[in-house]
Image (tube, rainbow, N blue to C red):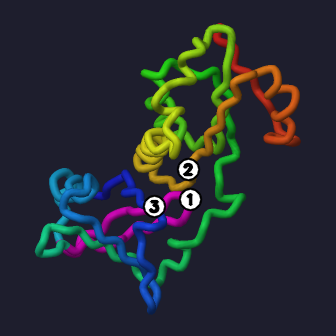
């Protein structure tokens, strides 16, 4: 049975090997290691789908379990695109401008957006958006790690590696008048009315 999801890694998780190919080593306590062991039940030699955020993918990374419970995934040297950054034409070309949802729904929205192949998300203010929504833990985190985690979860489920970018426009009118044309020049724009 082929796994549809893709294990996702950051570029710093991957070690390029001298003769080509790549290697990823995860400790026994890593959530992905636990997932591969308990859910996927992958044995030595099994093949898994892996990807690097904003880089390439591999359909047949080879599993090797360490004696200490660590997981090693090897990407064959024939995959020369695995550590190549995504080019502009490989990124999704659909962007979304959305009134900031309530904080309890934001994480789910980000995950779903990544699954759907959204390229850029602009979260904006609107008449019914409460001001304290902009104080959400998802938005005030200096490294936006919670937001990135939600987006990566969506990518894992979609099998994609192009991480959507997210920006916040607290003043919708200013954004529409001054920034939208620069962000999306010469594009078709569609408005979805709630009724």
Q: Which residue is drawn at the image coordinates 64% and 21% (left, top)?
A: 99
Q: Which mark is residue 127?
A: none
- Whichever of callouts 2 and 3 sits on the residue coming sooner in the sequence is 3
Residue with the mark numbered 1: 54
**Residue at image x 44%, y 40%?**
146
Above or below 44: residue 172: above
Q: Are marks 2 and 1 in contact (CB under 8 Å)?
A: yes
Q: Name the residue under label 3.
A: 10
Q: Is the magenta stretch mostly helix, strand or loop?
A: strand
Tell me where the magenta segment starts and ends, as one range. 44-64
Residue 60 is situated, as x and y percent measured from the top left of the image, at 37, 70
> Label 2 belongs to which residue?
163
Question: Pointer 2 and pointer 3: residues touching (CB < 8 Å)?
Answer: no
Say whether residue 3 is magenta: no
**SS category of the residue bearing label 1:** loop
Which secondary structure lies at badge 2?
loop
Measure the alpha-carbon separation of dots 3 and 1: 9 Å
State the count of labels.
3
Q: Where in the figure is residue 102, as x and y percent of width and height?
A: 50, 18
Looking at the image, residue 95 sits to the left or right of residue 146; the answer is right
Instruction: Report the side of 45 relative to 94 (left or right).
Output: left
Seen in the image, is 113 located left or right of residue 91?
A: left
Where residue 92 sits in the image (x, y, percent)? 65, 48
Residue 139: x, y in percent? 53, 32
Tell me how far mark 2 sits from mark 3, CA to CA: 11 Å
Q: In which quarter of the image is the N terminus?
A: bottom left
Q: Which of label 2 and label 3 is nearer to you?
A: 3
Question: Which is more N-terminal, label 1 or label 3?
Answer: 3
């Amino acid at each position: 049975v082929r796994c549809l999801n893709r294990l996702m890694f950051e570029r710093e998780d991957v070690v390029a090997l001298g003769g080509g190919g790549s290697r990823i080593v995860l400790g026994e306590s890593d959530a992905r290691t636990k997932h591969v062991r308990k859910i996927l039940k992958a044995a030595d030699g099994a093949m898994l789908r892996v990807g690097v955020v904003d880089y390439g993918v591999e359909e047949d990374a080879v599993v090797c379990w360490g004696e200490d419970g660590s997981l090693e995934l090897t990407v064959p040297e024939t995959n020369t695109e695995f550590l190549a950054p995504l080019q502009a034409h490989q990124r999704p070309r659909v962007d979304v401008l959305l009134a900031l949802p309530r904080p309890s729904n934001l994480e789910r929205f980000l995950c779903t957006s990544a699954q759907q192949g959204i390229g850029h998300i602009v979260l904006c203010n609107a008449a019914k958006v409460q001001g304290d929504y902009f104080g959400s833990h998802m938005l005030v985190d200096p490294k936006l790690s919670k937001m990135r985690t939600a987006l990566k979860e969506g990518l894992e489920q979609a099998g994609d590696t192009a991480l959507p970018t997210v920006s916040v426009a607290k003043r919708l009118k200013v954004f529409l008048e001054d920034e939208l044309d620069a962000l999306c020049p010469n594009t078709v724009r569609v408005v979805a009315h709630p009724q």
